[in-house]
Amino acid sequence: MVGAPPSTHAEVVVDLGALRHNVRRLRELVWKGSPTGQVMVVVKADGYGHGMVPVARAARSAGAEWLGVATCAEALALRAAGDAGRVLCWLAAPGTDFAPLVEAGVDVTASSLDQLEEIVRGAREAGEVGRVQLKVDTGLSRNGAPRSEWLALVTAARSAQDDGAVRVTGVWSHFACSDEPEHPANAAQQEAFEEALALAEDAGLEPEVRHLSNSAGALLHPRARYDLVRVGIAAYGFSPAPDVVTTEQLGLVPAMTVRGTVVLTKELAAGAGVSYGHTFVAEEPIRVALVPMGYGDGIPRHASNTAEVLVNGVRGRVVGRICMDQFVVAAPETHAGDEVVLFGPGSHGEPTATDWARWCGTIDYEIVTRMGGRQTRVWVGEEGDE
Ligand SMILES: *Cc1c(COP(=O)(O)O)cnc(C)c1O
């Protein structure tokens, strides 16, 4: 938590010390001292709303061998910010020019034969050996080559490697149900992944890294760790499967706090309706506080009349609809200028993003990733501050 008095009306505070703690903790939980197991911290979507570049730096300083992003633009932004380590990206539209990625030393993903061809073309244009990882769809039915294309893909990749255009650095896939340990899809996907690995091996490929697991896979499916785990949500301090294991049980610390300043308070008489549509009507006189954040800042409107916040150290419930710029909280002991904490690590009585997710019928991934309209984003716990 931030002790200093609020300097702005609305802030997203990101604790990079918590992030580094989580990355180290995850390595311990997953690899238990194994010297060869590698960790990729996934920093796509602006680091799940935490700020891609500061998160990337914190992840590297905590020992992440890899950073993972979805788009090519994200990978190039990491390079532009000075990151020189291994970076994998995995989502590119047809027609993507891969030459700049090859030049930047980014590992790119081929999810189809056509995409492999485009990568080879980009590598030739760049005049360098492109690093490519083959993504196989083992049952998520999203990105990745379908099973019917695996043989052709590994064969073409082998021949492109023999030609000196690319080096196949990885073979990988992604789970659909890893947060449900008993789901039969997990075993089926792993079996399919094994088949893909065998095909790659038969084609003479020797990938540096084989990987299948996101945070939930890494923590809940020890057999699916292979050479590398791709951790996103757990690095930001959340259990990837809160119904199976809690954040506290994992020893993770949520890195994001959203807080602000109460801008106005007032007493409402019994019968007063609050906010658009008067979906809340005071049954008795109440004191309310106005919070200067709304769905324009990523606060979900679905939290209307359900979410709680910490106002001046006491829990208060959102009353009425959350608007674009503001919402109202029932808070008996509050004054303009008081601190309001929407969510944080939960260590001072404030709700967590996981609580907000439950209140809104979504997942904490979405809660943290959508933050960031007009709030000031602040990073604390830089390495030097320790
Ligand atoms: C986002 C993403 C991850 C990280 O998932 P978490 O559940 O946040 O750990 C890993 N791999 C791929 C392919 C992803 O798109």
Image: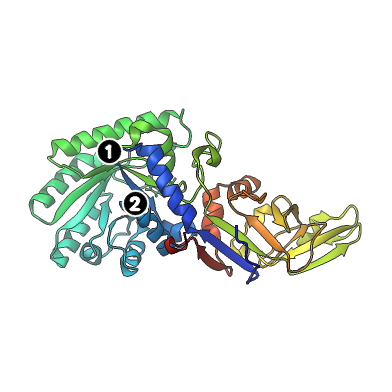
Amino acid type, residue under disc 1 in the picture: Arg
Of residue 348 and residue 96, the one placed in the foreground of this image is 348
Could you tell me which quadrant the N terminus lies in? bottom right
Circle 2 SS class: loop
> Badge 1 local density, few (<14 within 10 Å), some, or many (20+)?
some
From the image, tell me which residue sits under label 1: 147
289 vs 110: above or below: below
Q: Find residue 141 and report its image quarter.
A: top left
Pointer 2 or 1: first along the chain: 2
Of residue 155 and residue 377, the one placed in the foreground of this image is 377
Left or right placement of residue 210 versus residue 4 in this view: left
Q: Find residue 225 and report its image quarter.
A: top left
Amino acid type, residue under disc 2 in the picture: Ala
Query: Number of numbered discs present?
Result: 2
Give the residue drawn at x 42%, y 37%: 219
Of residue 349 and residue 280, the one placed in the foreground of this image is 349
From the image, tell me which residue sits under label 2: 64
256 vs 338: above or below: above
Residue 3 in picture, x, y percent from top left? 62, 62
Mark 2 against mark 1, which lies toward the viewer? 2
The answer for how far apart the CA atoms under marks 2 and 1 are is 31 Å
Circle 1 SS class: helix
Give the residue drawn at x 47%, y 55%: 17
Left or right placement of residue 113 versus residue 256 in this view: left
